[in-house]
Amino acid sequence: MLDWLQNVGKKTLHGFESLGRSAMFFIAVVQGIGVAFIRFRLTLREIYSVGVLSLVIIAVSGLFVGMVLGLQGYVNFAKFNAEESLGIFVALSLVRELGPVVTGLLYAGRAGSALTAEIGLMKATEQLASMEMMAVDPIRRIIAPRFLAGIISMPLLAAIFSAVGIFGGYFVGVGLLGVDSGSYWSQMQANVDFSNDIVNGVIKSVVFGIACNWIALYQGYDAVPTAEGVSRATTKTVVRSALAVLGLDFVLTALMFGDI
Amino acid sequence: MTTRFMEIGVGLFVVMGGAALFVLAMNVSNFASFNSKEGYFLTAYFENIGGLKVRSAITVSGVRVGQVSDIVFDPERLQAKVTLRVDNDHDYFSLDTSASIYTAGLLGEQYIALEPGAEDDTLTDGDEIEFTQSAVVLEEIISKFISNASTS
């Protein structure tokens, strides 16, 4: 019983400890971001590895998600003879929710895990320590450019996801199922608001980008420097990023569209 | 992989992202239509606005000419005061224009339909539309129908 209580206390303290460390890590990264702007070449390389290389999976997933939305929407709207509303349905669900959220989840799996493994291995092979030996701040040199690259890539990826998805929905709805092309676009334009829907979707994706990169980089930086430690950190990154994206999505949706 | 190749990749990525945002803004949302036209404001008082909302459409003969910009309750007249923003190119509404709240379809969104009258002078910014017809509330009709049926 006493052991158990001791354990609970230890776990709680440990949780607070790592939360505090991650917050301090976040502040240090934000302070280092200026350097990432000045030495933009470093950031450019990271945009390539987290953004450009994620492009294929994002575009293909967007296409399929849009096609599924088109199909599901059509089947259900057809019951009410409201096939014209298909465009609104596809566009709003992609721009408001699925675009940022699915991009965030895919990003955590595709890019976040890679970031954690990379930085964890750098730590395990003592590359970070040797940088410190040479008076190079690894947070500025290694972490900050990756963080900035993630924040730049995420909204672009989410926008590509939504745009491709809308064309996927168009392809299924108009091309295969025979919804009128004019009503698909005009209903969409009449009901999707630029500042309410598109801008809020972009804000969401920026927030998810910050969360995913923060988690991925912190887990790598904080990993136990062994092969097992790095693998656990990678798992944690994917799990926690997914939870963070979904949880933050609820909070942001409640703030933006909930009218509470 | 050479640096050049990487830079071209990032450039293409940024262009694609920008193009996607552009498509979302211009093709998907109302961005193109909502900044381009200047409008003038009219007010109208209604007994009951039903489900009318800010940004609901204003139409003439079914053609969209503007949108509802504000809805407040006027405590002095005990009526709902609706502010209508009409696009500047539609400046031909006579003083005796009437405004009615209709529903698109049986359960669709509500909108304001304007019907121009016969006078020569036209409404300008800040004017009030005097002839209004409130929204039809389905429950009222049903309750009237039921009370009629029970008295007869």
Image (cartoon, rainbow, N blue to C red):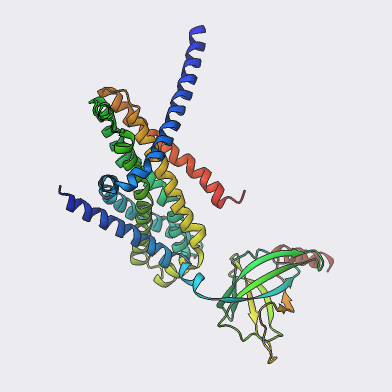
Front residue of this view, candidates A94 and A6: A6
Judge whether A213 appears above or below A61 on screen.
Answer: above
Of A111 and A221, nearer the camera is A221
Image quadrant assignment for residue A224: top left
* A44 on left or right of B90: left
Residue positioned 29% across, 37% down in the render: A142
Is residue B78 something one can see in this rendering?
yes
Q: Residue at x 45, y 53 (%)?
A: A201
The image position of residue A122, as x and y in percent, is: 25, 30
- Where A21 sits versus A40, above or below? above
Q: How many marks?
A: 0
**Percent of width and height locating residue B69:** 62, 68
Q: Residue furthest right?
A: B151
Residue furthest front as drawn? A135
Residue lying at the far top of the rendered structure: A2
In this view, A78 is above or below B132: above
- Asked if residue B67 lies left or right of residue B118, the reply is left
Left or right of B134 in this view: A235 = left
> In x, y percent, where is residue A186?
45, 70
Q: Closest to the observer: A6 or B140?
A: A6
Check the image and report above or below for A37 versus B31: above
Quarter-of-image position of residue B152? bottom right
Residue at the left extreme? B2
- Residue A161 in the image: state x and y as whole percent: 35, 54
Q: Is residue A3 left or right of residue B141?
A: left
* Most foreground residue, A227 or A122: A122
Q: Give the residue drawn at x 25%, y 46%.
A: A45
Residue depicted at x 55% and y 47%:
A254
